[in-house]
């Protein structure tokens, strides 16, 4: 019973700590890879827009080969995402993270 209580307390603390997309970037590579595995490359590309080369490279490294190729294609085509698309992409990744953290 006490172990369950400790586990629930940790979940509450994590939920409070990871409350926005930027905090997701602090996840380990293994965790982040699991989260983005089923996210569409276009959503990933939109989500990481304007977060810098380092973040972009990390997401490409962790993406599936298919998504990695699409991310590279979108970058080469200099696709510009609207603020709405950026928000939608970040929300998709965040929602996926929340589904794993339950």
Image (cartoon, helix red, strand yellow):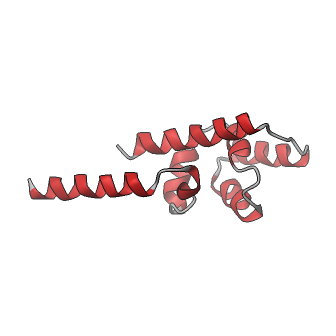
Q: Quadrant of the C terminus?
A: top left
- Kindly identify the residue that appears in the image at 33 percent across and 58 percent down: 13
Q: Position of residue 2 (x, y in %)?
A: 10, 58
Find residue 45 and report its image quarter: top right
Q: Residue furthest right?
A: 77
**Do we see residue 38 in this rendering?**
no
Vertical placement of residue 72 versus 25, above or below: above
Give left or right: position of 57 versus 100: right
Residue 90 at x, y percent in the picture: 62, 43
Image x and y of residue 85, in percent:
72, 35
Which quadrant of the view contains residue 66? top right
The foreground one among 26 and 37 is 26
Q: Residue at x 78, y 42 (%)?
A: 70
Left-right relation of 7 to 15: left
Left or right: 7 as drawn, with respect to 39:
left
Using the image as rendered, state which of residue 71 and residue 2 is in the foreground. 2
């Amino acid at each position: 019973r006490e172990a369950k209580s400790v586990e629930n307390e940790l979940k509450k603390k994590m939920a409070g700590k990871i409350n926005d997309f930027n905090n997701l970037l602090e996840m380990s590579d293994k965790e982040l890879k699991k989260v983005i595995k089923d996210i569409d490359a276009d959503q990933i590309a939109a989500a990481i827009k304007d977060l810098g080369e380092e973040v972009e490279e990390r997401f490409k490294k962790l993406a599936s080969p298919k998504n990695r190729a699409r991310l590279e294609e979108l970058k080469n085509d200099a696709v510009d995402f609207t603020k709405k698309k950026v928000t939608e992409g970040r929300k998709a990744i965040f929602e996926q993270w929340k589904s794993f953290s339950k």
